[in-house]
C-alpha cells in the first residue's frame, strides 16, 4: 500500500512539474516579439481602413446607433468608449489616438502600455459595430490580448534598442516566464480554433463528399481569382477538401511533436494563402498565419531575423558559453540555463 501511495505521489509531482514547465518555464521572447510586429501591423492596417467612412460606422448618427447597439448587447459584458463620442471631432481624435497606439505596438515603443491600450481599443471597435464582426476581428482581439500578457517588447523593438543603448550592445535578452505564458496561450487558443473549425465542417455533407472546396472557389461573391479551371480536376478538389478537414481536426495533436510540427506549419501556408488569394480574404488569411508563428522556435526566429545579429541572448543554445582560461584547462564551463524551445 505504501508503495502504491509513493508511486501516486511521484506521478502527481511529475504532473505538477510538467504543468509548471509547460506554462511558466522562462522562454526567449523572440517569437513573441515577431508576433507583436506582425499583429501590430495588422491591427494598424485593419483599423486604418475604418477611416474611409468612420462616421458611418462609429458616428452617433451612423448605420448602427449607440442605443441600438446597447440594446443588442444588454445581456453581455460588451463595452466600448466609442459609445460616448458624440461629435465628429472627438470620434476622429479617438480614432487617430488608436492608430498611434497600434503604430507604437508595431515598432515596440512603450510596449507594455501600448499593448494594453491596443487591446482596449480593439475591443472598443469590435463592440461598437457587432454587425461587422468577422473572424479577422476575433483573431485580432485574441492576439492583442495575449500580447498584453507577455513582454512583447523584450525583443525586436525600439524599447529593446533604447535599453541596449544605455546598457551596451552586449545586453542579453533574458528568458522570461511571462513570454512563455503568452506564447502558450496563443498556441492553445489556435488549437481550439482549428479543432472547432474542423468539427464544424463535419456537419456539412459537402465536406464529406469532397465538394466543399469547389463550392467556395466557384462562389462569385468571394472569388478574387478565377479558379473555375479546377472543375476539370475533381479528384484534386476532393483531395484538397479532405486534407483541409484532416489538418484542422488533428492540428491540436500533430502540431506539438517536433516530428510533425514542420509539416503542419508548412500546410498552414498554402491553406491560408489560398484563402487570402483565391477567396479575397487577404487579412484573415494573413492573421491566421501570424497566429501560427507561435509554434516557431525562438532559435529559428533569431536565425532568420537580421536584427538578431550582434544581440546577446542569454542561454542561446547556438552560442557556446564563455570560458575562462583556467576553466578551459581543467573542465568545460557550465552550460547556462537555456531558453524554452516551444
Image (tube, rainbow, N blue to C red):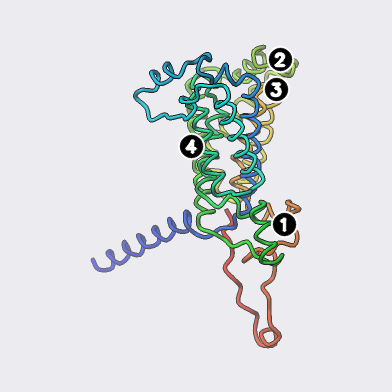
Q: Earlier in the sequence, mark 4 or mark 3?
A: 4
- Closest to the camera, between mark 3 and mark 1, is 1
In the visual, does 56 lie left or right of 326?
left
Q: Which residue is mark 1?
A: 308
Task: Estimate the spatial distance between the alpha carbons at disc 1 and disc 2, rounded to whole Å.
Answer: 47 Å
Q: Which residue is mark 4?
A: 192
Mark 1 vs 4: CB contact within 8 A? no
Q: Name which residue lies at 43% across and 30% down.
A: 79
Q: Is residue 135 above or below residue 226?
A: below
The spot of residue 256 in percent (x, y) is 55, 48
- Closest to the camera, between mark 4 and mark 2, is 4
Residue 187 in view, yes or no: no
- Closest to the camera, between mark 3 and mark 2, is 3
- Closest to the camera, between mark 1 and mark 2, is 1
Mark 3 vs 2: CB contact within 8 A? no
Q: Which residue is mark 2?
A: 231
Foreground residue, 205 or 186?
186
Mark 1 surroundings within 10 Å by alpha-carbon count, few (fewer than 14), some (14 through 19), many (20 or more): some
Which secondary structure lies at badge 4?
A: helix
The spot of residue 297 in percent (x, y) is 63, 52
Amino acid at each position: 500500500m505504501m508503495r502504491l501511495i509513493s508511486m501516486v505521489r511521484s506521478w502527481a509531482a511529475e504532473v505538477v512539474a510538467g504543468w509548471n514547465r509547460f506554462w511558466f518555464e522562462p522562454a526567449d521572447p523572440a517569437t513573441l516579439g515577431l508576433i507583436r510586429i506582425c499583429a501590430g501591423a495588422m491591427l494598424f492596417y485593419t483599423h486604418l481602413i475604418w477611416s474611409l467612412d468612420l462616421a458611418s460606422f462609429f458616428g452617433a448618427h451612423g448605420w448602427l446607433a449607440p442605443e441600438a447597439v446597447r440594446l443588442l448587447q444588454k445581456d453581455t459584458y460588451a463595452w466600448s468608449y466609442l459609445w460616448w463620442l458624440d461629435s465628429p471631432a472627438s470620434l476622429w481624435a479617438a480614432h487617430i489616438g488608436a492608430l498611434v497606439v497600434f503604430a507604437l505596438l508595431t515598432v515596440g515603443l512603450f510596449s507594455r502600455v501600448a499593448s494594453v491600450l491596443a487591446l482596449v481599443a480593439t475591443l472598443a471597435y469590435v463592440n461598437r459595430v457587432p454587425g461587422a464582426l468577422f473572424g479577422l476581428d476575433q483573431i485580432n482581439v485574441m492576439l492583442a490580448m495575449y500580447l498584453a500578457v507577455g513582454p512583447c517588447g523584450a525583443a525586436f523593438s525600439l524599447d529593446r534598442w533604447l535599453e541596449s543603448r544605455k546598457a551596451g550592445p552586449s545586453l542579453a535578452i533574458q528568458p522570461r516566464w511571462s513570454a512563455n505564458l503568452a506564447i502558450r496561450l496563443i498556441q492553445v487558443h489556435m488549437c481550439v480554433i482549428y479543432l472547432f473549425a474542423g468539427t464544424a465542417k463535419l456537419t456539412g455533407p459537402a465536406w464529406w463528399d469532397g465538394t466543399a472546396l469547389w463550392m467556395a472557389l466557384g462562389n462569385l461573391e468571394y472569388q478574387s481569382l478565377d479558379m473555375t479551371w479546377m472543375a476539370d480536376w475533381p479528384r484534386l478538389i476532393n483531395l484538397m477538401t479532405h486534407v483541409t478537414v484532416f489538418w484542422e481536426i488533428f492540428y491540436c495533436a500533430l502540431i506539438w511533436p517536433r516530428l510533425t510540427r514542420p509539416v503542419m506549419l508548412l500546410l498552414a501556408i498554402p491553406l491560408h494563402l489560398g484563402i487570402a488569394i483565391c477567396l479575397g480574404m487577404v487579412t484573415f488569411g494573413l492573421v491566421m498565419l501570424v497566429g501560427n508563428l507561435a509554434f516557431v522556435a525562438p532559435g529559428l526566429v533569431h536565425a532568420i531575423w537580421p536584427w538578431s545579429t550582434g544581440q546577446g541572448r542569454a542561454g542561446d543554445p547556438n552560442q557556446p558559453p564563455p570560458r575562462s582560461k583556467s576553466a578551459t584547462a581543467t573542465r568545460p564551463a557550465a552550460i547556462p540555463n537555456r531558453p524554452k524551445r516551444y
